[in-house]
Image: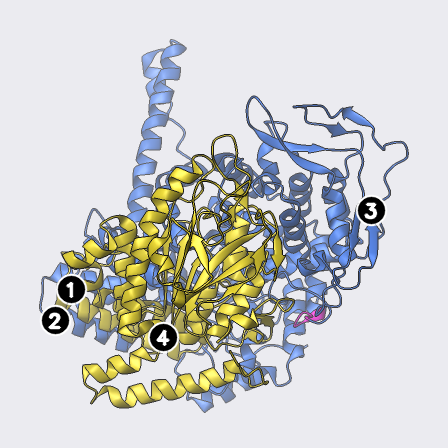
Chain colours: A yellow, B blue
Amino acid sequence: MRRDHGCRRADHEFSRRGFLATGAAAGVAGLASPAVSKQLRKGQKRVLQIYLQGGVSQLESWDPKPGTRYGGPFRAIPTSVPGMHICELLPHTAQRMHLLSIVRGINLKTNSHHDGRLFMEMGRRSGSFPYVGSIAAKHLTPANAPLPGYLHITTRGLTDNTNAFLDARHAQLKLAGPKVPDNLIRPDALTVQAARRSGELLKRLNRRFSGRGGQKAFTDSYNASFEMAEKLMARRDLFEGKPDPKDLQRYGSHPFGRNCLLARTLLENGATVVKVTHHGYDTHAENFNFHLEQLGEFDNTFCMLLDDLHQSGLLENTLVMVMSEFGRTPKINVRYGRDHWGTAWSIAVGGHGLVPGAIVGATNKEGTEVSEREVDGGHLFHTYLQALGLDSTANHDLGGRTVPIGDPTRSPIKELLA
Amino acid sequence: MPVFLRTRDTQMLATACMLPFLIVTQAIAAAPESTFPSRIDALIEARLKDFSTHASPICTDAAFLRRVTLDLTASIPTAAKTRAFLKDTAPSQEKRSRVVTELLASPQHATRMQYLLDWLLMERRSSENVASAQWQKYLRASAVANKPWDELTREILADDGGDAKTRARARFYLDREFDLTVVTRDVSRIFLGVDLECAQCHDHPAVTAYKQQHYHGIKAFLDRSFLFTDSKSKRKSLGEKAEGDVTFTSAFDETKGKTAPRILELPELVDPKDTLKQYITKPAKNVRSVPRYSRRRQLGEAMTVAENQDFRLNIANRLWAVMMGRGLVEPLDLRHAANPPSHPELLSLLGDALHQHKYDMRWFLGQLAHTRAYQRSSVTRPDSATVANRHYAVGLLKPLGPEQYAWATMEATGFLEKVRIDARASLAAAAKKAAAKKGSKKKAPKAKTAATPPNPPTLADIEAAVRKTVAPHVKTFVTQFAAQGGQKTTFSATAPQALFLTNGALLREWLKPAGANLLARVSKLDDSQAVAEELYIRILNRLPTESEQKEVAIYMELPGKRVDVLGELAWALLLSAEFRFNH
């Protein structure tokens, strides 16, 4: 668990490394066999973010309190980590807890979906800051990446300003599941030849316009948007192919299963940050039935994805987070529901840069408050970025203005960093 | 005062002759010292040593027409207007001045202001508690009347949403759910140009000018108010208590503070005597309480008093940024001692002028359009440093806002022309019908009715009808191109936007030949020179250069159906960066 906390600036170091890596990749690209370039790509750090939307109950997942006043009907089961117990609704995940760690002492001090979600993503309680995925995409996506850096698979369309003041290249690109994104397909009336030659004309016009001056960041961003669009169009196959029936059987043929299969495909094909949203945890009524159903779907599918990433070696370079906007109240309401609860809840994390099999923090006996190592979205944010080798205490340089990347009043959970 | 581009400079530039761009040899006639635009230019040009060596010349007439039409009316000029303007042999400054006056008087200018005010005040928030149509109607009426900014501010900050007639004004509060943190922050950002977010919990660690008491001083105007939901109608409005004070504790050193309502460093507003706990409507269950003395109602007044310099500096900076592409203070809401304006005297001049002219935004925008700073070419001189950008020595690129982008695209493709023709026809038909009905009601002799021609529809009527027809398309562009958040001068483009432009059905539809639209027109033209001219005039509002004409001619030789090839050309020009930006 030793980690060098000397004052080497990770962001500087990173960009140097990034430069070498891209330089090397570019040099080899002409000669490299697919295996070699795959090898190179494997070295690229990635992020897999599973978002359990609505607020998963910590009591029915990572922090069970069976037999207590608010414990609910489910038991706790042992896991592959001696002494670690999680809820029996996650039997498959329990067998893989040696790959993951649990943070049990989260207190966001908010019970609002909106505020909780933003706090967990931006590491700031309020204001407009880039999401962790946007920052990771900015720093980890190689210049020659075959896909846009930050992809979010979700069946609902909330409009998030994920990149805040960062360039739109690092904004989240939404995919509505394993189907071809909007406007990805060339109109029928347009021949390949016509598309190519008019595209070339457009590039020529734009080069000429950039040449007359003007703010370079503007013209660069405009031109880059077409390059990213081209990348997506070139990988239309990723969205079109029918999944392998065997895979479908393993992952489940429900939307979450299909979405996680797509996440695997995207990670394998050079995406940097992939977020998958599993909707429907806002269980104000019938909390137990809903969690039985929802987590049943999550548990199996997530484990298949985790296994595949583990087996292909990708997990080594991939930071994994299973998070929500908050947990659920210990108190069970009259409709057998649990309500919003940002006060004492948990998430699971694993993969690159993190210690596996650990439990950090704790809640009291009935789960009504954090009793040990209280953290919030700010601490988690620093932890994610530092796990990825990025200096979260450095600044975003906005040309004349600097903004601290992570909240300066928070620090990473050091005991979790590998 | 230095006169821009003295003949000597012009000759020097011309002899240097490595410049690929057109030099307007005709120097602007020296404006009298006293005019407002010339005072602006004097301050701009004195701020940078060797300004003239960095300065781009005044832009061409074509560039000016496109620029000012977009800035003042949210769209590009029509082909007819462009041609007429280029043909007009009047002195350049005279016709430029004339066009500014025309544009400011047009109904389209109100449309532009409506969009700007919406963006500025609501920052692309979705409509939650106040219907969007109601809000737009209010903005429209304000823009048409050229309502002064201070008056608009007072209306918006005073309304509680209780009266159905003025409820739209309360959207600023109501669609922020009257979240006290959000509302306090946004009031200071949007109306004062300072972002007190961090000052909420402590004096700002980096920005020493932002004090915790500033945040809480603004908050004290609002803190007695609360969001009230009527139990029957479920309609939300603001209630207010007649008691409660704002106290705060620093998160750093536990020091405690207390403040009455106050605007930044201005004195505190003391509540009038004997108003504590005095109500017009007393608080009770399901009752919206109204105090005798409302602290919230003082906010607009306190904000707009002459002593409050921040109010005028903020709006001056924001309107300057609209026209010039960059605020004198950037980011627009972060003015403080350590982030001073790039041109402090200029900002004071602008703020004072706005104040003296009773916050007449239409006048102000028109004045800015007359400056050399506004009229400079956006083509950077090859020998110029990037310092030129910060010093307005070169025209800056301004990304088209989503609404501008929609209108410009519809104009360029000729879709808008069809909408205008249809609107005129249907308005004329409706007027004729109404006149006939009126005539028959009066039982006037038939011959007489026929003799009274119906009033022709006014420009404003046509504009309103057109606006209604294209509203869904404007909305599509807003969905695709608007980022959440307030006014800023940065730009970034996304892959889904590029896909929308490349493969989206809407643009491709507008690029199909129909009626007298762009493609139908160019398809009928014989030679490539005429095609190039038509495409460039309609899409880029200028004539093509010789090499661009050649480029079009060569493209037209490519295999394929003529109409398809022309469609490809039009598509590429429409997606070009030159179209995407106001330059």
Indicate the secondary structure of the residue bearing disc 3: loop
Whole-number angstrom distance, CA of label 4 to CA of label 1: 51 Å
Q: Residues within 10 Å of mark 2 (few under 14, many from 20)?
A: few
Secondary structure category for the residue under label 1: helix
Q: Mark 3 points at which residue?
A: B260
Q: Is any part of residue A20 visible from this angle?
A: yes
Q: Do the residues labelled 2 and 4 touch (CB within 8 Å)?
A: no
Name the residue nearer the viewer: B571 or A173: A173
User: Which residue bears the numbered disc 4?
Assistant: A316
Distance from the alpha carbon under mark 1 to that under mark 3:
69 Å
Q: Which of B449 and A61 is in front in this view?
A: A61
The lab-note entry on whether marks 2 and 1 share a chain reads yes
**Badge 3, how many Cα within 10 Å: few under 14, some, many 20+?**
many
Chain letter of the residue carrying label 2 = B
- The crowding category of the residue bearing disc 4, from other C-alpha atoms within 10 Å (few below 14, some 14 to 19, many at least 20), is some
Label placed on residue B565 = 1
Is residue B583 in view? no
Q: Which of A238 and A302 is in front in this view?
A: A302
Task: Pick whichever of labels 2 and 1 is earlier in the sequence.
Answer: 2
Q: Is mark 2 on a helix, strand or loop?
A: loop
Nearer the observer, disc 3 or disc 4? 4
Question: Per the image, is B265 magenta?
Answer: no
Q: Report if residue B341 lies within the magenta region.
A: yes
> Is residue B202 positioned above or below B390 on the image?
above
Label 4 or label 1, whichever lies nearer to me, is: 4
Residue located beneath label 2 in the image: B558
Q: Do labels 3 and 4 share a chain?
A: no
